[in-house]
């Protein structure tokens, strides 16, 4: 498994794979990998010959610097998980490689980024759209897999690749849940024991609402 740390080195790796006729799948992540990410890797594998997992904690999508700095970065565990699950390359650029001094261009998503999470986290989806564009330009994948857990993000990425003519197929990856229904997320590590005990109320309420709607 290769660990690639700069956009130029990523271009070389990906050009070599394409010259060998390999179909490339990308799973963009911010690391702290869990079963949910492993599901996305398996989905990419179903559609591609080689799988790249990007691990990059993207400062542009954080509203608060303490949130960015405190975000979990278990690098050696992540590398081991990728190795154990047959990932072909990890793309883990540094912040300086991604956003060198003078960096000044962003991708601004439209109406689909308004409301819901966009309302509570100003600038968040602009940061996501910018980094996803850069990751796709570096890896040049045939397919990229994004989890349905971040449903608004998935819709924004679909719009982005259509609007900007990015030559990549976006595939949704199913939500993986704990047995009590809570969706797996790297951020679940932030929940206190009391919050974690309360969390299943969300999925219970959503399921109850769905049942009520179905009943008219
Ligand atoms: O969903 C995430 O983990 C991030 O928003 C993504 C898509 C990797 C961009 O940084």
Image: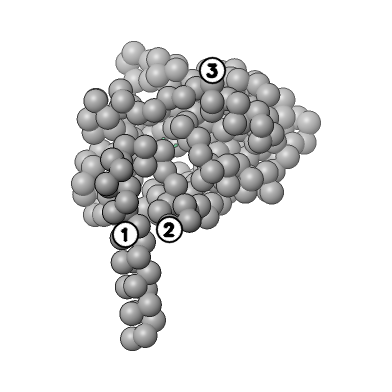
Provide residue 130's location: percent of width, then percent of height: 38, 34
Quadrant for the N terminus in the image: top right
Using the image, determine if residue 98 lies above or below residue 131: above
Q: CB of residue at label 3: within 8 Å of ligand 1?
A: no
In this rendered view, identify the residue nearer to me: 13 or 59.
59
What residue sits right under mark 2 in the picture? Answer: 181
Q: Secondary structure at mark 3?
A: loop
> Which sits earlier in the primary sequence, circle 3 or circle 1?
3
> Which sits earlier in the primary sequence, circle 2 or circle 3?
3
Q: Residue at x 22, y 41 (%)?
A: 122
> Which sits earlier in the primary sequence, circle 2 or circle 1?
2
Q: Residue at x 24, y 25 (%)?
A: 65
In this rendered view, identify the residue nearer to me: 140 or 58.
58
What residue sits right under mark 3 in the picture? Answer: 5
Q: CB of residue at label 2: within 8 Å of ligand 1?
A: no
Asked if residue 1 lies left or right of residue 70, the reply is right
Q: Secondary structure at mark 2?
A: loop
Provide residue 194's location: percent of width, then percent of height: 27, 46
As measured in the structure, the alpha-carbon distance from the residue carrying label 2 to the one carrying label 3 is 36 Å
**Residue at the extreme right of the image, as rendered:** 20
Q: Residue at x 32, y 16 (%)?
A: 102
Question: Which label lies toward us, 2 or 3?
Answer: 2
Q: Secondary structure at mark 1?
A: helix
Query: Badge 2, how many Cα within 10 Å: few under 14, some, many 20+?
Result: some
What residue sits right under mark 1 in the picture? Answer: 202
As measured in the structure, the alpha-carbon distance from the residue carrying label 3 to the one carrying label 1 is 38 Å
């Amino acid at each position: 498994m290769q660990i690639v740390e700069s956009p130029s080195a990523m271009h070389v790796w990906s050009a070599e794979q394409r010259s060998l006729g390999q179909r490339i799948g990308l799973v963009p992540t911010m690391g702290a990998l869990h079963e949910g990410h492993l599901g996305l890797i398996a989905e990419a594998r179903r559609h591609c010959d080689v799988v790249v997992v990007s691990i990059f904690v993207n400062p542009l999508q954080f509203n608060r610097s303490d949130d960015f700095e405190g975000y979990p970065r278990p690098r050696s565990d992540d590398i081991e998980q990728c190795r154990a699950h047959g990932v072909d390359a990890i793309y883990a650029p540094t912040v300086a490689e991604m956003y060198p001094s003078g960096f000044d261009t962003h991708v601004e998503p439209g109406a689909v980024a308004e409301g819901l999470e966009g309302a509570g986290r100003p600038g968040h989806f602009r940061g996501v759209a910018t980094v996803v564009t850069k990751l796709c330009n570096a890896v040049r994948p045939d397919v990229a897999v994004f989890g349905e857990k971040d449903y608004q993000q998935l819709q924004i990425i679909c719009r982005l690749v259509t609007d900007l003519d990015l030559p990549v197929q976006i595939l949704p990856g199913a939500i993986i849940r704990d047995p009590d229904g809570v969706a797996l997320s790297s951020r679940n590590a932030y929940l206190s024991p009391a919050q974690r005990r309360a969390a299943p109320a969300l999925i219970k309420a959503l399921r109850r609402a769905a049942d009520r709607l179905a009943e008219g």
